[in-house]
Amino acid sequence: MLHLSLFWLLIGALVGLLASALRTPCSQRLRGGKLIAIGAISTLAGGWLGIRTLGFFFATGIALWIALLMLVMIPLATCGGKQKR
């Protein structure tokens, strides 16, 4: 379980790093390692949720989808839906 949790943290950090490389107006407020931390924490939580609900086979897929959802929704929530066009 420890290896799987470390794998989810690594995957989440990589997804967060990719999200921080995007330059959207809403994600400009979450600079530094905030998006990387959001990706890692949400992937870890999603992996554990995936194990509890669907088992080991689907846990990594669930973890990745939850991380992507959080990396899209949290910057939009902090932006308040107001984007510069």
Image (spheres, helix red, strand yellow):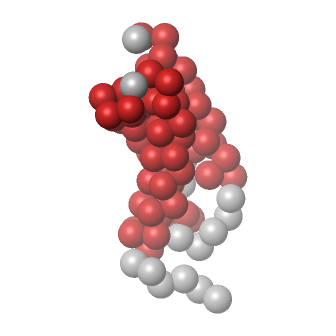
Q: In percent of the image, x 49 and y 11: which residue is there?
A: 3
Q: Quarter-wise, where is residue 54 in the image? A: top left
Q: Is residue 24 above or below residue 62?
A: below
Q: Position of residue 78 (x, y in %)?
A: 40, 68
Above or below 65: residue 56:
above
- Give the quadrant of the C terminus: bottom right
Residue 26 visible somewhere in the drawing = yes
Decide which of 6, 83 is in the foreground and name it.
6
Q: Is residue 75 left or right of residue 20?
A: left
**Residue at horizontal 46%, vertical 30%?**
59
Number of numbered markers = 0
- Image position, residue 12 (x, y; %): 53, 36
- Report x, y in % for residue 51: 37, 27
Q: Is residue 54 left or right of residue 34?
A: left
Q: Nearer the viewer, residue 27 or 50?
A: 50
Q: Is residue 43 visible?
A: no
User: Which residue of the protein is positioned furthest toward the top in this rendering?
Assistant: 2
- What residue sits 39% from the left and 25% below the top? 55
Rendered residue at 44%/21% (across/down): 56
State the residue lying farthest toward the bottom: 85
Compare residues 79 and 45 and report the one nearer the observer. 45
Q: Position of residue 73 (x, y in %)?
A: 45, 63
Considering the image in quadrants, where does the N terminus appear? top left
In the rendered view, would you say 61 is above or below 75?
above
